[in-house]
Image (cartoon, rainbow, N blue to C red):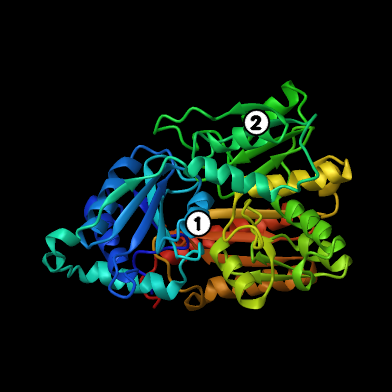
């Protein structure tokens, strides 16, 4: 059982455990020890998004790293996938991102990339946890002249922009396209406008004035109302919204409608299959992806493999089993031949390439996947009892699954960071599945208050 790391690093309220200065400094020291190679000091890059607490955590990490002899490179505010890319490019031993992704400004988090640019596997996170929680850092073992140094690199932004532009097909341009961008007052606020403009698009940008407190505030991938309005008011071809750390993307079509994430995964996979670029004709998605994605991919001779929720698990499956494309319907899209993690801007560029080459708008492509009605509830619970230990809950889940048959499914999971249960039900009747979800939510609330479950 992991005690600090959740599905995407360590995360919580800034200045509250585990996101305290003391613990973050220990995380830095643990990383310096763990990534030290052949008794040579580790080289660690650090990037962050735009939230206010990033400054203090950047400093705390650096103190912990340097105290244990690691050299540190500050990259400043950049998207999470930029840190993954630059960790490799700079031949660093690890990369650290200070971000709470799509969460409000008062949250923050720490996530790690290995020297290959991939997120750490569970086993390594557990080793880091042990170092942190033991807390036995012998700082006096680092000689005075072996304390680490801090370096700042200003070229990270430009290097990442060129990397993104090079992922876009050389024979294509974005000339003539009018695109709305919502950068969520987050890490993409500088990068995204420059990339799309330099490739020829006419852009209209909102959510591009971060002040440390407004990241993800009624903007970005989770709040597309203003972007949808912008697309309609300005008669744009497309709207593109990123989350606070830039690893996910949501699209708005020319009519102001949000395009379902599974529709995007579906038509991108179709394009890759058509061009014989989809490894093993397989898409890797998560258990939260819609049944419509499975049926659409199967209709063209492909298949969908499901992992547990979290883009890191999608990436692990891609690597382990030799696939090259997958993602989550929340907007994480991974092109493994281009990137080691979800990259919102890169995914947007690949989507635009399909649109430009086919001369069809995104809404036409999205029709390929017929989305099944789906309801998702996030419910506070008193305790996260093992689901299998609650007979009333498990019996009702089985009854609902029996009623839905092959035309629906029930997915239940606990949040990795909060006392919440996520209830997702799919079926061909929205009214019915909503009723079932509400019923299960009430049952979970009631049963979680009991203390006689193991």
Q: Is residue 187 above or below residue 295?
A: above
Q: Image check: 412 left or right of 428? A: left
Q: Position of residue 225 (x, y in %)?
A: 63, 32
Residue at position x 44%, y 72% in the image: 122
Q: Nearer the viewer, mark 1 or mark 2?
A: 1
Q: Position of residue 53 (x, y in %)?
A: 33, 41
Identify the mark nearer the N-term, 1 or 2. 1
- Per the image, label 1 sits on a secondary structure element best described as helix
Distance of label 1 from label 2 (alpha carbons): 34 Å
- Per the image, label 2 sits on a secondary structure element best described as helix
The quarter holding residue 231 reads top right
Q: Viewer-proximal residue, 173 or 262?
A: 173
Badge 2: how crowded within 10 Å, few (<14), some, or many (20+)?
many
Residue 149 at least partly seen? yes
Q: Image check: 448 left or right of 412? A: left
Q: Position of residue 193 (x, y in %)?
A: 61, 32
Badge 1: how crowded within 10 Å, few (<14), some, or many (20+)?
some
Q: Viewer-proximal residue, 190 or 204?
A: 190
Residue at position x 29%, y 73% in the image: 130
Which quadrant of the figure contains the N terminus? Answer: bottom left
The quarter holding residue 369 reads bottom right
The quarter holding residue 239 reads top right
Mark 2 = which residue? Answer: 227
Q: Is residue 5 above or below residue 73?
A: below
Which quadrant of the figure contains the C terminus? Answer: bottom left
Residue at position x 63%, y 37% in the image: 195
Task: Please give the label number shown on residue 380.
Answer: none
Mark 1 = which residue? Answer: 89
């Amino acid at each position: 059982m992991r005690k600090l790391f959740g599905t995407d690093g360590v995360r919580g309220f800034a200045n509250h455990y585990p996101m305290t200065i003391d613990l973050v400094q220990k995380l830095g020291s643990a990383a310096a020890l763990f990534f030290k190679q052949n008794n040579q000091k580790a080289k660690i890059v650090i990037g962050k998004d735009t939230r206010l607490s990033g400054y203090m955590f950047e400093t705390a990490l650096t103190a912990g790293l340097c105290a244990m002899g690691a050299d540190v490179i500050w990259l400043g505010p950049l998207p999470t996938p930029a840190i993954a890319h630059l960790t490799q490019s700079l031949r660093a031993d690890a990369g650290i991102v200070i971000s709470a992704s799509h969460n409000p400004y008062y949250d923050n988090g720490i996530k790690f990339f290995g020297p290959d640019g991939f997120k750490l596997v569970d086993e390594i996170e557990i080793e880091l946890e042990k170092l942190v929680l033991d807390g036995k850092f012998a700082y006096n073992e680092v000689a005075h002249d072996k304390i680490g140094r801090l370096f700042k690199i200003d070229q990270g932004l430009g290097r990442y922009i060129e990397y993104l532009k090079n992922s876009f097909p050389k024979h294509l341009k974005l000339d003539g396209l009018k695109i709305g961008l919502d950068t969520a007052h987050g890490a993409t606020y500088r990068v995204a406008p420059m990339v799309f403009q330099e490739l020829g698009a006419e852009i209209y940008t909102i959510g591009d004035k971060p002040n440390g407190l407004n990241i993800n505030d009624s903007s970005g991938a989770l709040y597309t109302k203003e972007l949808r309005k912008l697309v309609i008011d300005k008669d744009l071809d497309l709207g593109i919204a990123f989350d606070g750390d830039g690893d996910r993307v949501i699209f708005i079509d020319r009519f102001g409608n949000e395009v379902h994430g599974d529709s995007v995964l579906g038509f991108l996979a179709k394009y890759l299959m058509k061009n014989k670029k989809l490894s093993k004709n397989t898409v890797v998605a998560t258990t939260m992806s819609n049944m419509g994605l499975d049926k659409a991919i199967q209709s063209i001779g492909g298949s969908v493999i499901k992992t547990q929720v979290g883009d890191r698990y999608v990436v692990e499956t891609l690597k382990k089993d030799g696939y090259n494309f997958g993602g989550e319907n929340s907007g994480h899209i991974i092109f493994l031949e281009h990137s080691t993690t979800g990259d919102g801007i890169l995914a947007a560029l690949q989507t635009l390439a399909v649109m430009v080459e086919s001369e069809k708008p995104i809404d036409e492509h999205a029709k390929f996947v017929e989305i099944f009605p789906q309801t998702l509830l996030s419910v506070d619970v008193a305790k996260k009892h093992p689901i299998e230990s609650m007979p009333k809950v498990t019996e009702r889940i089985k009854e609902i699954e029996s009623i839905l048959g092959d035309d629906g499914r029930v997915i239940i999971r606990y949040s990795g960071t909060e006392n919440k249960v996520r209830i997702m039900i799919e079926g061909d009747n929205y009214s019915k599945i909503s009723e079932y979800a509400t019923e299960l939510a009430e049952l979970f609330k009631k049963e979680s208050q009991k203390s006689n479950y193991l």
